[in-house]
Amino acid sequence: MFRYAAAALVAAPIMLSALPAFAEIERTPAPAGARVYFIEPADGATLPRTFMVKFGLENMGVAPAGVDVAATGHHHLLIDQELPPLDQPIGGDFKHFGGGQTQTEVTLEPGTHTLQLLLGDMKHVPHDPPVYSEKITVTVE
């Protein structure tokens, strides 16, 4: 048994070195002047536990995830989170609107929360340059 384990340890670096390098992720270009923002709520708003969030988008269109149409994307809502790496597919616990939705109802615990929007392309990758909103702060009663 030891003989096989030792052989595997010797072979592993050789096998790994034969693997091709990971390709850089291709990013979709964003048009000049593209901007995502909150229609509502406003920065600094005091809100009930359940409230509407409406997404605004300028100089781009909205398309569902997986649909390849130039100058479009779909929304991701970050609640109390930082932006993810902007050169990688968007994952994590972000609220994803891959159906092309432009608003949602959100329920949060009382307290202060931050909201931010990030646009993803058909493959869930941020555009180049990335299109994301300013972070806003809301207070939930």
Image: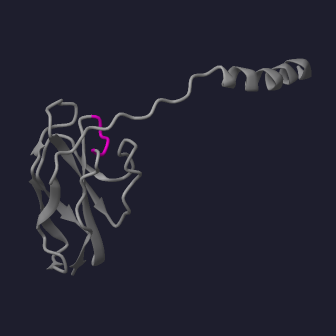
- At x 16% / y 56%, what residue is drawn? 35
Could you say where residue 115 lies in the image, as x and y percent from the top left? 26, 66
* Extreme-front residue of the structure: 32
Q: Is residue 17 above or below residue 41?
A: above
Foreground residue among 102 and 105: 102
Quarter of the N terminus within the rendering: top right
Q: Is residue 24 above or below residue 96?
A: above
- In the rendered structure, the answer to whether residue 6 lies left or right of residue 63 reads right
Quarter of the C terminus within the rendering: bottom left
- In the rendered structure, the answer to whether residue 36 lies left or right of residue 113 reads left
Q: How is the image coloured?
A: one colour
Q: Dividing the picture into quarters, in which one does residue 54 lie? A: bottom left
Foreground residue among 3 and 87: 87
- At x 9% / y 54%, what residue is drawn? 58
- In the rendered structure, the answer to whether residue 16 lies left or right of residue 107 reads right
Residue 92 lies within the magenta run: no
Q: How many numbered marks does the figure carry? A: 0
Main SS of residues in magenta? loop
- At x 38% / y 46%, what residue is drawn? 91
Q: Is residue 79 above or below residue 86?
A: below
Could you say where residue 102 lies in the image, as x and y percent from the top left? 11, 51
Foreground residue among 124 and 130: 130
Foreground residue among 138 and 29: 29
- In the rendered structure, the answer to whether residue 45 lies left or right of residue 17 reads left
Could you say where residue 7 lies in the image, as x and y percent from the top left? 84, 19
Task: Tell me which segment is drawn in magenta.
Answer: 123-127
- At x 39% / y 50%, what residue is drawn? 92
